[in-house]
Amino acid sequence: MLITEKKHGIRFAQRMSDLGTETAFVVLAKARQLESQGRTIVHLEIGEPDFETPAHIVDEAVRALKAGATHYGPSPGLPEARQAIARYVSETRRVPVDFERVVITPGAKPIMFYTILALVDEGDEVIYPNPGFPIYESVIRFVGGRPVPIQLHEENDFRLDVGELLDLVTDRTKLIIINSPQNPTGSILTAEDLEAVGRLALDRDIYILADEIYSRIIYEGDFTSILHVVPEAMDQVILLDGMSKTFAMTGWRLGWGVMQPTLAAAVAKLQTNSNSCTATFSQMVIPPALFGPQGPVEAMRAEFQRRRDAIVAGLNRIDRITCRKPAGAFYVFPNTSRLGVDSQTLADRMLQEAGVAALSGTAFGRFGEGYLRFSYANSIENIKLGLERVEAFVAKL
């Protein structure tokens, strides 16, 4: 049945047929349903830190609420919060950024949505990583663009291949999306990768959406941004970041984009027309979060590294499963192709039969076939329990 067909008195717009979803939330709902029936489920499906927001950030929000920060603010964001983000990006990406380039949104996803909505006309092509965050393809299709997947190969550590990228670029290419550190593979683009993408964008007048939401969750070396590697491409780069992953603030809905000022004004106009502004009191925690105590951030990163090492070692001990060690984020993307079961069936059976919630690699695009994604945003004890269940389940296949 087409979604435009009348059902229960509703005739949906055709564009709704092109809108996808995030499978993690679907699997979470199924897992919760099993738990309501008395099952114990090991949750390795959802991509959010299992830590509490640092206390000093919560205290600042309470102070802001008590001080009356409960009214509308400017659509691009509070000036003091935008200035703090500009300073933070300038320091972490090592390139000067003016606050007029900053737009604050309720979560980072609106930066994806507004950027694509503002730049991509019907028929324009957008190159995006596959496997990759599913909302990229969803929004490209929704606005009438043509999604062009670039396959991330395991043998290349799930980094995009610059040669393949060149082959995909046409005269209709309007935007290239990069994500580093990457969801679902945990891969990180090298400085050489970033320079090649930046030079290509400059040469061909293509925009780049650089999703850097996991920039503070890396395990070896320092984070490198495309803004630092190719600063002359700044006007063609839209940087996406936010508070959710770094500060365990997924429910606060605080994200931002850094972009050319004219585009920033357009994105702010889209925000005016959709949700008016980001919550005022929540924006007031941005300066003390970015420049206050960073101990909780480092402690969380160190714990994620400990869990990464445990889950990678455990998966590689399971017969017919191999797993590369991710360099960032908090996901592993093990190869399950030797099990002889397609990824979706494997994920479904693992939930039902073993009580382990994971995502099919195909939840992140067709090139994810033969893989599963596990989030290690869970305790070491639960990760070990999940590994035991997976090993027992695989032994019966």
Image: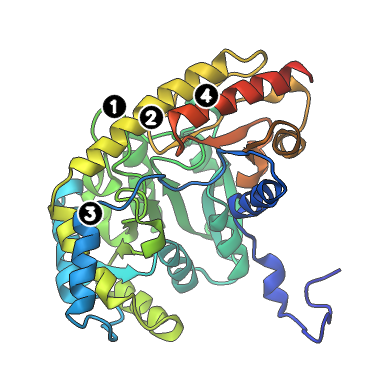
Sooner in the amino-acid sequence: mark 4 or mark 3: 3
Decide: few, some or many residues near mark 1? Use Cα within 10 Å; few <14, some 14-19, many ≥20: few
Q: Amino acid at mark 1?
A: Glu
Residue 220, label in figure: 1
Residue linked to disc 3: 55
Residue at x 55% of width, y 38% of height: 44
Residue linked to disc 2: 327
Q: Secondary structure at mark 1?
A: loop
Residue at x 81% of width, y 87% of height: 9
Decide: few, some or many residues near mark 2? Use Cα within 10 Å; few <14, some 14-19, many ≥20: many
Whole-percent x and y of residue 13? 71, 80
**169 vs 184: above or below:** below
**97 vs 312: above or below:** below
User: Label 2 vs label 4: CA separation?
Assistant: 21 Å
Residue linked to disc 4: 384
Whole-percent x and y of residue 219? 31, 29
Quarter location, residue 5: bottom right
Q: Nearer the viewer, residue 131 or 169?
A: 131
Q: Are marks 2 and 1 in contact (CB under 8 Å)?
A: yes
Sooner in the amino-acid sequence: mark 2 or mark 1: 1
User: Label 4 vs label 1: CA separation?
Assistant: 24 Å
Q: Amino acid at mark 3?
A: Ala
Sooner in the amino-acid sequence: mark 2 or mark 4: 2
User: Label 4 vs label 3: CA separation?
Assistant: 29 Å
